[in-house]
Amino acid sequence: MTWETIIGLEVHVELKTESKIFCNCSTRFGGEPNTQVCPVCLGLPGALPVLNQQALEFATRAALALNCQIAGYSKFDRKNYFYPDLPKAYQISQYDLPLAEHGHVDFIFGGEPRRVRIRRIHLEEDAGKLLHSEDGGLSADANVSLVDFNRSGVPLIEIVSEPDLRSGEEARAYLNRLKTILAYADVSHLKMEEGNLRADVNVSVRPTGSTEFGTRTEMKNVSSFRAVVRGIEYEAERQVKVLDEGGSIRQETRQWNETKGVTIALRSKEEAHDYRYFPDPDLPALDISRDFVEGVRANLPELPDARQARYVRDYGLRDVDAGILTSDLSLAAFFEEAAGLYPKDPKAVANWVLGDLLRIMNARAAESDEIPITPKQLADTLMLIDRGTISGKIAKTVFEETMATGKDPEVIVKEKGLVQISDTSELEKVIADVIAANPQPVADFRSGKETALGFLVGQVMKATRGKANPGIVNELLMKALK
Ligand code: ADP
Ligand code: ZN
Ligand code: MG
């Protein structure tokens, strides 16, 4: 029997508001613990929340970017549970009337177009952060946990997908696209290492061909895409093994353990009724006017699909190339600035970015927001080729050197003596030497074997350490051979 894996993701994204969702404490990351707190986000008696309008705008913008319908009427509910990082013992969230529903994310996976449906997006508040002794920062034998409430009350959106994903790698592709769209929508800092984006991962398996879903387990708060993929693969395999052995899957919450590479059962999964949801009496319901929604829609930044289409239309790029360039906001911004500085040939700019730039960045595992060369340096390199100062081949060396040292291309060319040799008399001497040293290829060429010319050009390039102007070499060689 073969099995199919079914995955649905609940992705939590911290919004980039200056202040928290229901109070005016700062959302800044990395402050001294418990310095960005007040009676509201500490849940002190009598404190009253007030909704941050910017959070509602960001959430609406994100929902529109993800093709959702925005509710006309929405409200906040209390989700009751006890945990030391939740001082009120309830989280302000949205239960039955979420801000947005019925969206979708389109992306390419394995060369094929895929669509994952978004069931709902709701607004809620983040919890505080627990620091356990095993996390470091505390002495290992202290056997205590500390809590930092700076994060408590940071605005979150929760993006709930339908169970439309079928593998760990497909989940990664979905998350990548989701992250790209949110980056374009400009609603979150999206720093994975600061926990701006975390996923609850629901996994079940079923016999291939079956139309019913199996019982799922849920991994909470997985904070890297790699962990999501590994967690899904481990969990699917575990479930298949249990079922193959005649057992059954318990609906439960499990924890992904990154170091051991396994999931561990935490508790039987809670049901909605366990949370005793009820409308938060401290917050008025949201009457969301069409004017508000249309205003947000009108101010939506350009999204990745639109930008991809624009690159094809305005720069004449191939659709796949435009797709790669626009899949990352920083990369797209780099390309566009360089293309603006070198308007005569945007395709050449794209080729450099997609070829040498990405190759070197991948080799160094560099992040796209730390591209070690400026758009101007790339444009200048191309202009050096146009002016005949360097050959296309030497340009690759110069480009690599700029990426390694940050030095301007002109400086590298001067320092390393890379100026192209276009001087005919100098090249004629080299050509005479090459002809004298290679009688066989010369004879081959003269008897009609045209390919021998390439070899001889190569010898001239070698003798000049790549600095000879290839166009002129070709011309002079032909003349000398005839
Ligand atoms: P809850 O909020 O209690 O976790 P939901 O029914 O709202 O439960 O589902 C949450 C997530 O679980 C959604 O992303 C959904 O796609 C996913 N999900 C639901 N059923 C399954 C299943 N059988 N296998 C995998 N994922 C599932
Ligand atoms: Zn506060
Ligand atoms: Mg859930």
Image (spheres, helix red, strand yellow):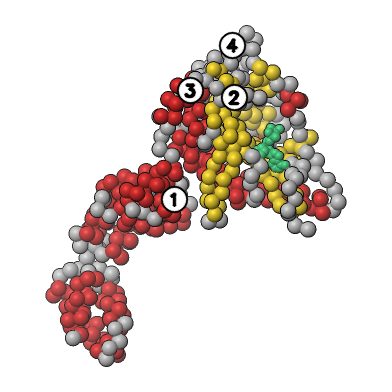
- Residue beneath disc 2: 125
Residue at left 30%, top 78%? 454
Q: Secondary structure at mark 4?
A: loop
Of 29 and 136, nearer the camera is: 29
Residue 414 vs 37, above or below: the answer is: below
Residue type of the residue flagged with mark 3: Arg
- The location of residue 208, given as percent across then percent down, is 73, 54
Q: Secondary structure at mark 1?
A: helix
Q: Earlier in the sequence, mark 1 or mark 4?
A: 4
- Residue beneath disc 1: 323
Point out which mark residue 290 bears: 3
Point out which mark residue 45 bears: none
Of 323 and 78, nearer the camera is: 323
Outermost residue toward the right in this view? 246
Q: Earlier in the sequence, mark 2 or mark 3?
A: 2
Crowding near the residue tagged with mark 1, few <14, some 14–19, many ≥20 C-alpha atoms within 10 Å? many
Does mark 3 have its CB less than 8 Å from ligand 1?
no
Q: Are marks 3 and 4 in contact (CB under 8 Å)?
A: no
- The location of residue 325, given as percent across then percent down, is 41, 49
Question: Left of 374 or right of it: where is 83?
Answer: right
Q: Nearer the viewer, mark 3 or mark 4?
A: 3
